[in-house]
Amino acid sequence: MSKPNVMIFRNGGRQRMNEKAYINNEPLVKTTYYKYLGIMFSFKLSLTYIKNIYRYLRLIKLYIHTIKFINRECNDLPVQLLFDLFDKLM
């Protein structure tokens, strides 16, 4: 079982080493990045947009390639089914 993590957001500046968070007197592990609903957050309260964009572009390219392969193997599926499959993958 993994331990819960905590991210302490800062409005600029560095994270302090002595900042700690607890639940039921158990220390939480501090993290500087956290992925939530596919979006990467950093402790500076900035979204890491470039990383997210490149990650999504790689995924989209992979999914399109996969859908083309499936369509070729299944002898031309209906277009709406292919769009639905893409939506499910995303």
Image (spheres, rainbow, N blue to C red):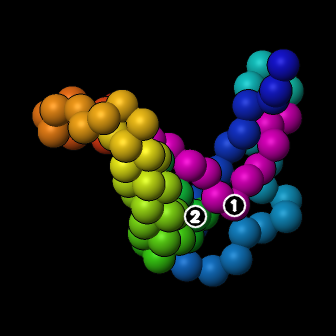
**Residue extending farthest bottom:** 13
Does the image show residue 33? yes
**Residue extending farthest front:** 75
Name the residue carrying label 2. 42
Q: Which residues are magenta?
A: 27-37
Q: Nearer the viewer, residue 23 or 36?
A: 36
Q: Is residue 29 left or right of residue 5?
A: right
Per the rendering, the mark at residue 32 is 1
Residue at 70%, 77% in the rendered image: 14
Residue at 78%, 19% in the rendered image: 24
Residue at 37%, 43% in the rendered image: 72
When asked about the image quadrant of residue 29, the answer is top right
Q: Is residue 11 above or below residue 83?
A: below
Per the rendering, the mark at residue 57 is none
The C terminus lies in quadrant: top left
* In magenta stretch: residue 22: no
| Disc 1 residue type (three-letter) | Thr
Residue 85 drawn at (x, y percent): 31, 33
Residue at 57%, 64% in the rendered image: 42
| Disc 2 residue type (three-letter) | Ser
Residue 40 drawn at (x, y percent): 52, 57
Q: Secondary structure at mark 2?
A: strand
Q: Is residue 7 above or below residue 79?
A: below
Q: Is residue 21 left or right of residue 54?
A: right
When asked about the image quadrant of residue 57, the answer is bottom left
Q: Nearer the viewer, residue 25 or 89?
A: 89
Q: Nearer the viewer, residue 55 or 48?
A: 55
Q: Is residue 17 above or below residue 6?
A: below
